[in-house]
Image (cartoon, rainbow, N blue to C red):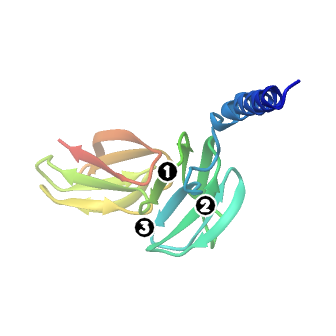
Amino acid sequence: MSSVNKQVHRLNRIAIGFFLSALLVFPLLQCKSTTSSTGVDAYITVTNNYGEALNIFMDSVFQFLLENKDSKIISHVTQANHKLEAYKVSTSTKVDSTEIDVVQITGYTWTINGPPRIQVTNNYGETLSIYMDYKYQFDLVDTEDRWIFNVTFADHFLQAIRPSTGKEVASTTITVDANQAYTWSVQ
């Protein structure tokens, strides 16, 4: 075999080697990674506006203590559906929870708002006594509104009673299942 043929034969083997290597490496380059090309993972920023310190859990695993009016980040979050929960530090009572479906490498947020509260407005035309779960809350004069604060997550039965007769003039049941404001207008 001449030296030219040997050289061509050697170049062909090198070219075939590069081609086969490319066939093996190319599929690997197409695989999705749990981190972005910049090396950044998905993360969740948690903000506490509840009014007191809270313990934060993700998927039943303690993450951190979060003071009121503070934010912290849960980093290195995998792509999955994650359950987040917030508990009072003082009593271990759950005050809020949410689920976040992490589907891409980006930042997610969860804000824990103040405790549930119910605003009651009296548009009945006379003073009424307001009860929640058969417990007296306050009296409302006509066109007045007031708040019942720190309401627990549950179904709450509200009644408006005419004080002069002790008779119920209106009632409702409010399902409290989120940290938000609820309203009831007595007509």
Q: Which residue is mark 2?
A: 75
Q: Which residue is mark 3?
A: 49
Count of numbered marks: 3
Give the spatial CA distance, label 3 vs label 2: 21 Å
Quadrant of residue 73 within the rendered picture:
bottom right
Q: Which residue is mark 1?
A: 106
Up-down: is 3 above or below 165? above
Q: Earlier in the sequence, mark 1 or mark 3?
A: 3
Which-is-in-front pick, marks 1 and 3?
A: 1
Please state the horizontal and vertical placement of residue 185, each as a whole percent of the image: 22, 46
* Residue in the picture at 63% in, 73% down: 90
Quarter containing the C terminus: top left
- Residue 168 horizontal side relative to residue 83, left or right: left
Tell me which amino acid carries mark 1: Thr
- Residue 111 horizontal side relative to residue 82, left or right: left
Please state the horizontal and vertical placement of residue 70, each as a whole percent of the image: 47, 74
Up-down: is 24 above or below 116? above
